[in-house]
Image (cartoon, rainbow, N blue to C red):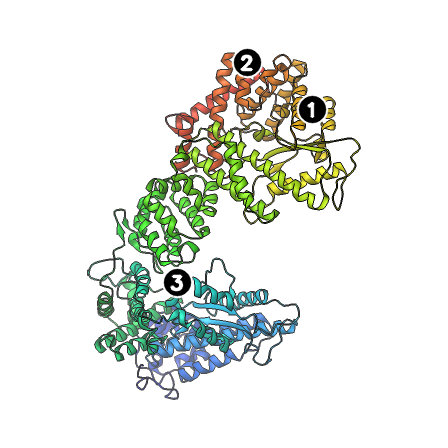
Amino acid sequence: MRDESAEPARGAGSLADRLTMIPPARDMEKGDLLFAGAPLIEAAPEKTRKFLAGVFTNAPYLRDIGLADEERLLAILDSDPLVRTDKLIESARGLRSESEAELMSELRKLKKELALTLALADIGGAISLDDVTGGLSRFSDAALDAAIRFCLDELTRRGKFAPKDPEKPEADSGFIVLAMGKYGAFELNYSSDIDLIALYDPDKAPLAGNAEAPVEFVRLAKRVVKILSERTGDGYVFRTDLRLRPDPGATPLAMAIPAALVYYESMGQNWERAALIKARACAGDIRAGEAFLREISPFIWRKYLDYAAISDVHSIKRQIHAQKGHGRIAVAGHNVKLGRGGIREVEFFAQTQQLIAGGRIPDLRGKRTLDTLAKLAELGWIEEAARAELEEAYVFLRAVEHRIQMVNDEQTHTLPSDDAGLARIAALMGHEDVSAFKDAVRARLVVVQGHYAALFEDEPELASDLGNLVFTGDDDDPGTLETLSRLGFKRPQDACRIIKSWHFGRYPAVRSTKARERLTELHPLLIDALARTDNADQALIAFDGFLSKLPAGVQLFSLLRSNPQLLNLLATVMGAAPRLAQVVSRRVHVLDAVLDPAFFDAMPRAAEFRAGLERTLGLARFYEDALDRARIFAQEQQFLIGLRLLSDTLNALQVGHAQARLAEVVVQMLMERVVEHVAETHGKLKGGDYAVVAMGKLGGREMTASSDLDLMLLYDFEEGVEKTDGQRPLEPGPYYIRLTQRLVTALSAPTAEGLLYDVDFRLRPSGNAGPLATRLSAFEDYQANRAWTWEHMALTRARVIAASSDRIQAKIEKSICDTLCKPRDVATVAREVAGMRARIEKEKGSKDIWDLKQVAGGLVDIEFVAQYLQLVHAAAYPDMLNQTTETALGKAAEAGVLDPGDAEVLVPAIRMYHALTQVLRLAVEGPFKREEAPRGVIDLLVRASGEPDFARLEAKLADMQASVRSTFEKIVGPVRVQD
């Protein structure tokens, strides 16, 4: 342990009497001017004035808080700094404020006085490093206690908490705050954040009324954070950080002790062991906190020498030690905490050996860095000379760190890069000569680096042919930022932050050491693949989201490393197809299918979809489970279909067919489940039949990744049947409406596994004004007597996709055919179709050539032509009826009702539009904006179009749309948009 005998003792005199160092003022005349309006200071002894001038001309923050209250400043100088510190701490601990605002104000005022007291005493050499860091840490304990006590008092007044001791409600409260890192070791620096973990014991907490521990203690933690860290007119007390708790991205601010124990026992990582070495119960229910730390002691301290743990410490340190070689260390701009030879290296020097041997040697389980160095020397793990050198360097560098922070009260550890800034720090350290100060700093850094290098002499390299790629530690490695920028990452700091988070084991996929090792090996390949998407930042964000949802990572990382082509394909998905990226992140095993050579050969068939979904639903334990499993299956299959498009295995027409087949199978099999589910309550309708009719894109087999399902449900039943045969019987109409409602919910309700499809029933007879399910006879009557022309246009795409019997399917198909083959007045239909196109153009029209559906000459024009031709010519040529637009145009041409020249305009156009639409629906959320589109999406569009480049593609699109609109007006008539 450190020898405290030579350090200042309480009662050894006032701060002014104990000054041993007067920092040189930057400008003594300016220093005198500072006190022109401060008569009490002007009257102070010359030594005091010189000291304050030296401090205030070099540290603006201390000047501001010092001169804000002249009497307080002189009182600090006239008192024993250690005694004053003790009083300030006790004042904070004893606060019992009436309001939150009053508490926040009082704590901030006390913290300012403490900060000024410790800073002046530290600079003046009147107290030791331990007095400074210990005073800050103990004040933080007191502030936390005051904040917790205030919150518990309020909870008591609301009848939700019954304290065992109203004067000390935090005692036996079950609410625990652990101090972590430097704070846990009483080593806070001058402008430190405080790292905390908040826990609660749900069985011990004396809650009352209807209070629930998870709710109340999470709220309490949030409020304590606010009380301490929110900036007000009085400043702040401490910035707080609760990210060291288990899995911080997925857990609440306050965590139940049983959950924390399970986490540490099953998933805790070596970096967390290192963090918990310094942990201590600092506020709240101290006894419960100490009991918790005893319980997790076996996790922190292994029974056997743990050399395996050192690999994780290596990975954390690689970032800090990334610059290899033994060149001269530049002091200007150097980070005294994280840089070569810095404070962190001293801490790691001690901590690494604690992790290795602390399990067998309890004496090595200390929290404080200098105590641990002393114990390592005492036990013979290091030489006494090494201990002495490291201690002297550590104390010196911590003093430098404090003075860097005193200048502007900033949480920084980096020395200024200019001589004027360095001169401030040098002066606060008692150096008049900046060069001498640089030499003093460099000498300590070299000493530390030498001892650390000996401990880590076998450290592996972390560089690749791409350049430096180092992603562990607290701060960013400049070489890595340079590499990322060169590769095309526009926000390299954000990229570093994302990748570094993986190495802290905060996602399930990277919690195991092996997974992190595999991911590190994958870094060069992964980053290169993401960079090649030309939307590297977005691709990385998508990959991070993907990684966050993975249940495990070793298998995938090994798979990707062994199959670079799969990694490139996955990177394309991440950069260009966000919908696919979401699926693969939830269902990583879909990638297995991509490795099957058959994946690139076969067009998926309905029979395969049905067999796969039958297997999936066969595993369901209950109805809601079946809905979840259907979502899993459909999302996986949509991913594989989309991937086939991206990999050029299927063309756009085939993709539309495949998506439609998948949707048909899902609707068929879920409808069967819906019928059985409704039967549990209402029974079935004897002699009743139903059919689900697809319209729109599903009916036309032209679905994309984001298509809605346009559906209607038709039914029929034998005369004389009045009700279903269940416990709660329904009449036929309400029964089929109930089936339809349940089908809509089965398809479109969000569950834990997401959505299946958005569903639209507005194309049913009378739209939203009509019943949700329609009897066949009513459907036939409506179509024959009341339907509008646009409804018959929609009917050209109608087809039965699920039916309870062949009989009703045949009836519906005949009814649709009869309706469409009815003779019509050509001029009337042409006028109504053109008018409808004009109305749509007025409401939704666009001049953007990439609005492929609504732009003049776009998809709507071609679909309307095909529907118009079927309506006016099906009476003579019934075989030309077909739900798919391209096929219908081909049949119209064969029947001679579509001029071959017009067909040569329309058919290539709809193929082009569908190909581009399929890519856009996979790749882009919202409207396509060519100026913002990444190269990966542009390349996919160019490839899908068959054009040589994007400029030619845009020119071709504009010409094509003009030709389509001209053809539409030639066949149907002019589109007159009314103002």
Q: Give the image location of residue 323, x and y in percent.
A: 25, 57
Q: Earlier in the sequence, mark 1 or mark 2?
A: 1
Query: Measured along the vertical axis of the image, is residue 94 above or below residue 519?
Result: below
Say which label, 3 or 1, has the lower sequence index. Answer: 3
Separation of residues labelled 3 and 1 (CA atoms): 67 Å
For badge 1, the amino acid type reads: Trp
**Can the viewer see residue 684 in this picture?**
yes
Is 467 in front, or is 133?
467
Between 468 and 405, the one lying in front of the other is 468
Q: Judge from the rendering whether residue 120 lies leftward or rightward of residue 757; answer left or right.
A: left
In which quarter of the view is residue 167 placed?
bottom right
Q: Which residue is mark 1?
A: 788
In 3D space, how far apart are the residues under numbered discs 2 and 3 (Cα atoms)?
A: 70 Å
**Residue that sits furthest to the top in the current view:** 896
**Residue toward you, 51 or 964:** 964
The residue nearer to you, when weighing 950 against 400, is: 950
**Numbered badge on residue 713:** none
Check disc 2 and report the residue beneath it.
Answer: 898
Q: Residues within 10 Å of mark 1 (few under 14, many from 20)?
A: few
Dot label at residue 269: 3
- Lateral position of residue 322 relative to residue 745, left or right: left
Disc 2 element: loop
Position of residue 463 measured from the top left corner of the image (x, y, whole percent): 26, 52
Q: Is residue 574 visible?
A: no
Q: CA distance from mark 1 to mark 2?
A: 24 Å
Q: Position of residue 68 (x, y in %)?
A: 46, 73
Mark 2 is on which residue type?
A: Leu
Q: Earlier in the sequence, mark 2 or mark 3?
A: 3
Mark 2 surroundings: few (<14), some (14-19) or many (≥20) residues within 10 A: some
Q: Is 836 displayed left or right of 120 in the figure?
A: right
Marks 1 & 2, CB-CB < 8 Å contact: no
